[in-house]
Amino acid sequence: MSDPGTVKKAREKSQVCAFLEGIGMLFQDLGDGPDPPDIHVFQEGLPRLDIEVSEYHPTSDRVEMEERSRAFLEILNGLIERRPSLNGVAVRLLVKDAKMPRRSQQRAIAEELVQSIESVLRRGWVSQGRYELLFLDYVIPGTYDQDVHGSLDLSAKEWPIVAEHLLQVDLQRTAIDFFFPAGIYQAQFAICSPRDDSFRAILERKKERLDNAIRNGRYSKGESALWLLIPVNVSKDLSSFVFNNERLKQSIDGCGFNFENSPFDEVWLMDDNGGGRSQRVHPWDEPIYRATGQLLA
């Protein structure tokens, strides 16, 4: 059985190697640091470079939301795909629970949602175009109301499970006769957007470890530069896919971390699935490096 520490160290060295090659930095050797930092980088005729590595994994609530939404969509899309009457109908949901419905509730929600959509289509209440479905108490079962903004109000009493868990259902009905996978607005936004609190948690945790190591005499920077490397877009964690996100600078600036009072001379993000693509986020630098050491426009 592999030693977890050995596996972790090998992975960190592999990530640092890909990163250095990506920015075009030549080096002679990589050595184990005192942990912290993780890696010593040796360059001919230059002071040693020290690199601390910490993968970006968002908070547990966000990962739980992602897993729940994936499980729910698997059930819902399975039901939609088996119904020819729903071919050409795109479904997008806005849920009430920010963490997504619990697994024990998901099948009941999905089944009643599909029944409600089939009912709307069967009754001829929608034609081609986009519709916003709301489930409200005042509507009499078996009827609907359409307001001036175009939303289709259905009966919460007729569809109580959907009304309890979903704020809104958006339907896009087209003439195309094939299956459209459903989606959840909150899950799509969460997976695509970086989290200020997650970046701050990494930065604060790593700063504390380095400060303690320096204070206890286990590590001395001397003439060495100290960099923090944060691999993102990590395999099997879709919520970590934030490289080159349009909100990235806003998230870094808004995380509230005092970079000037930290031991890190530079902080970099590296696309763990991009062959060494990387970007410096402190001091902020717009260019993105690719695996050849060249800049991407």
Image (cartoon, grey):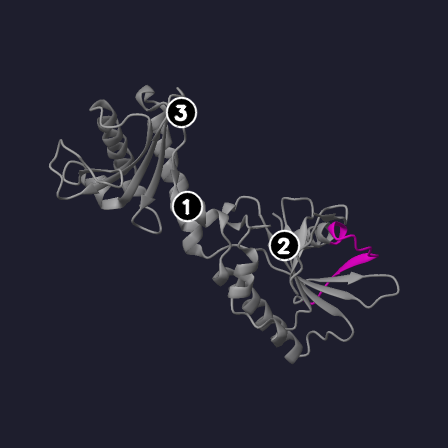
Assess disc 1: are there few (<14), some (14-19) or many (≥20) residues with their C-alpha within 10 Å of its C-alpha. Answer: many
Which mark identifies residue 187?
1
Cα separation, mark 1 vs mark 2, equals 30 Å
User: Can the viewer see residue 102?
Assistant: no
Residue linked to disc 2: 8
Q: Quadrant of residue 174?
A: top left
**Residue 269 vs residue 25: left or right?**
left
Magenta-drawn stretch contains 291: no
Which mark identifies residue 225?
none
Three-letter residue code for mark 2:
Lys
User: Residue 74: x and y, percent?
Assistant: 39, 34
Instruction: Please name whichever residue, 225 or 117, is drawn nearer the observer in this view of the structure.
Output: 117
User: Can the viewer see residue 148?
Assistant: yes
User: Residue 53: x and y, percent?
Assistant: 64, 59
Three-letter residue code for mark 3:
Phe
Assess disc 2: are there few (<14), some (14-19) or many (≥20) residues with their C-alpha within 10 Å of its C-alpha. Answer: few
**Residue 72 vs residue 281: left or right?**
left
Q: Nearer the viewer, mark 1 or mark 2?
A: 1
Examine the rendered structure and indicate whether residue 285 appears above or below residue 239: below
N-terminal of the two: label 1 or label 2? 2
Which residue is at 17% across, 34% downward? 144
**Residue 245 vs residue 157: left or right?**
right
The magenta stretch spans which residues? 20-34
Three-letter residue code for mark 1:
Ala
Cα separation, mark 3 vs mark 2, equals 42 Å
Residue at disc 1, secondary structure: helix
Residue linked to disc 3: 179
User: Residue 217: x and y, percent?
Assistant: 68, 79
